[in-house]
Amino acid sequence: MEPKTLLITGFMPFGSEDRNPSWEAVSALPERIGDWLLKKLLLPVEFSRAADLAEKAAEDCHADAILSVGLAAGRTAVTPEYVGVNVRDASIPDNAGVQPEGEPVDPDGPAAYFSTLPVREMTKAIQGAGVPAKLSYTAGTYVCNDLLYSLLHRFSGTTVRAAFVHIPLEKDLPLNESIHALTLAIEVI
Ligand code: PCA
């Protein structure tokens, strides 16, 4: 089978964290998993800008699918995200100092989009390997949700599918387990 292109993104550190395991996990993945050639992209934790950079990279590399990864401090399982919502509501400023309170991601967009990659199958595959995982119905209202909603909006009606996976802090789940989880998630796309 012809290899397909997966744009996979991770984030820079933000808030009080000096590391972000999302990029550490993404950058540790091999260049190819199954039929997928991985194109990796490090994103700034900034409303709009992260999504703009990811959209442009997806177009430039003719991505067939996009899997974005972020840190969810406080969660202890890998959580594929079911839905992105049209809300920006930040309890801390982003890395550009922007802190929206109850604004839409896109004033003309629908309230929400469901992920277009098989997040339920991803969750089951990760659980099946003994790594803690749970399907999540909220990606929050910070930059991760902003990215997920924006990508689903931008590529709505196209063949480009997208999803988001949150991973825990390394103290709550070792990085090699998050890396294993991402590999399993990609294998079921
Ligand atoms: N987590 C944040 C943004 C960047 C990241 O890794 C979030 O969950 O919105």
Image (cartoon, rainbow, N blue to C red):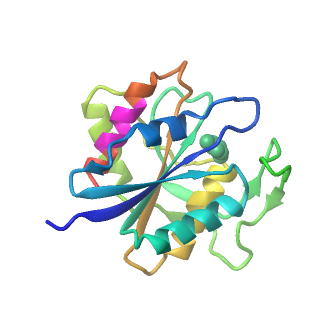
Q: Is residue 125 in view from this perspective?
A: yes
Against 172, residue 158 (above or below) is below
Picture coordinates of residue 169, whole percent (x, y): 56, 27
Quadrant position of the N terminus in the picture: bottom left
- Determine the residue located farthest toward the top in the rendered image: 171
The answer to if 182 sits in the magenta stretch is yes
The quadrant where residue 130 appears: top left
Q: Is residue 124 in view from this perspective?
A: no
Against 59, residue 71 (above or below) is above
Q: Is residue 133 left or right of residue 9?
A: left
Picture coordinates of residue 160, whole percent (x, y): 40, 72
Q: Residue at x 76, y 35 (%)?
A: 15
Picture coordinates of residue 95, whole percent (x, y): 78, 47
Against 76, residue 152 (above or below) is below
Q: Is residue 19 left or right of residue 137?
A: right
Per the rendered image, the range of residues in magenta is: 178-184
Q: Which of the pair 155/138 is nearer the observer?
A: 155
Tell which quarter ligand 1 is in: top right
- Determine the residue located farthest toward the left in the rendered image: 1
Q: Which of the pair 92/11 is nearer the observer?
A: 11
Q: Is residue 100 left or right of residue 88?
A: right
Picture coordinates of residue 107, whole percent (x, y): 74, 75
The quadrant where residue 28 appears: top left
**What secondary structure is the stretch in magenta mostly built from?**
helix
Q: Which of the pair 77/23 is nearer the observer?
A: 23
